[in-house]
Image (cartoon, rainbow, N blue to C red):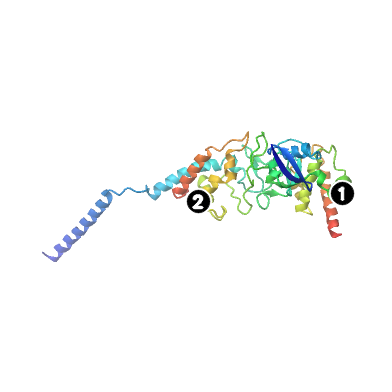
Amino acid sequence: MGKITLKVNGEPRVAEVDPQTPLLWVVRENFGLTGTKFGCGIAQCGACTVILEGDAVRSCVTSVACAEGKSVTTIEGLSKDRRHPLQQAWLAEQVPQCGYCQSGQIMSAAVLLKATPDPTDADIDDAMSGNICRCGTYQRIRRAIHEAAKLMKGARRE
Amino acid sequence: MRKGQRIILASVGVLAVLLLAVLLWTWWPRPAGPARTSPATDDRKAIAAFEAVATVLSSPRCANCHITGEAPLQGDDGHAHVMNVKRGPDGRGTPAMRCANCHQETSSLAAHAPPGAPDWRLPPPDRPMAWKGLSPAELGRMLKDRAKNGNRSLADLVEHVTSDKLVTACWKPGPGRALPPLSHQEFVEKFTEWVNNGAACAE
């Protein structure tokens, strides 16, 4: 056991855990941020995606030691008022069906739009192929990402 | 003595001296020193050592990422990497699909989870070092080509195969993945033998 300090959604947090504990467990069990989901546990589905220092990491295979001293953003920290362009677009397009994978989908999309503000369909396919949706909402995900890109572009103009 | 006889005698003398010199050079015991074989022998040793090196480089643990095109391979059968993974502009993937998003600093102990090493990546697109399908001789020439190998000298290559964690990770791939055909120590020994014997490649 050891004390691991990391910044979660902008706030310094401390977890007293085995350093090899998956970041996903610490986020959910120690910090109570249950928006991030456990899917496969072997980095194959993307449901556990969080943003670690700007990258869309799979928190089920990332040890909390790898996140020590670093900045982690979960779905709860994407915006303070749930009005992030991606969240607005997800609502507008009514993307989720069961919803289980959607927090991971949104976190990957956020990283994509940061790097590629005006993505093509191919850019979206490349970026989102590691996030699996058993309900098959891919077409709506793609539309929502384009919509969010437009919202963000508009916000930059204002 | 007539002039003709003198010329013949002088010629015979010169030939005798040359013959003696050749015999002495052949039979004279040489001082003990570092073993120095002929270039032809060195080449044979180097080529034989590299044959062993090539079996490792051609194994899936190495060849799956030393690929042509954009898509890495995975598994012992070298199938296309799932999730539409791509090399990207720096060899580390594309936005939101970076190699290190899943490949952590060490291999996961769970079956089917990703293998790992610090800074997991493919060679960059401008020098992909793609060697799937190459003969050992072609592979050896590619390795030595500083325009393709990241400007590495032979000594740099020995260092690379000895201690680069992305290389040594091939021998700790996690469960369900075959190891290369030589141990890492044997691989380094053969690689070093190749370099020390002139790093020759077959014609």
Q: Could you tell whether B87 is left or right of B192 in the image? A: right
Q: Identify which residue is drawn at 71% across, 40% down.
A: A3
Quarter placement of the N terminus of chain B: bottom left
Q: How many marks?
A: 2
The amino acid on which the numbered mark 1 sits, given as a three-letter code, is Arg
The numbered disc on residue B155 is 2
In the displayed orientation, state which residue is furthest to the bottom: B3
Label 1, on which residue?
Answer: A83
In the displayed orientation, state which residue is furthest to the left: B1
Indicate whether B67 appears above or below B151.
above
Q: Find numbered disc 2 in the image and state the secondary structure of the residue it sits on.
A: helix
Q: Find residue A40 and report its horizontal and vertical position in percent.
A: 74, 35
Q: Could you tell whether B37 is left or right of B29 in the image? A: right
User: Crowding at label 1, few (<14), some or many (≥20) Cα neighbours within 10 Å?
Assistant: few
Residue B6 image-quadrant placement = bottom left
- Same chain under badges 2 and 1? The reply is no
In the displayed orientation, state which residue is furthest to the right: A92
Q: Identify which residue is drawn at 75% across, 37% down.
A: A25
Q: For mark 1, name the chain.
A: A
The amino acid on which the numbered mark 2 sits, given as a three-letter code, is Ala
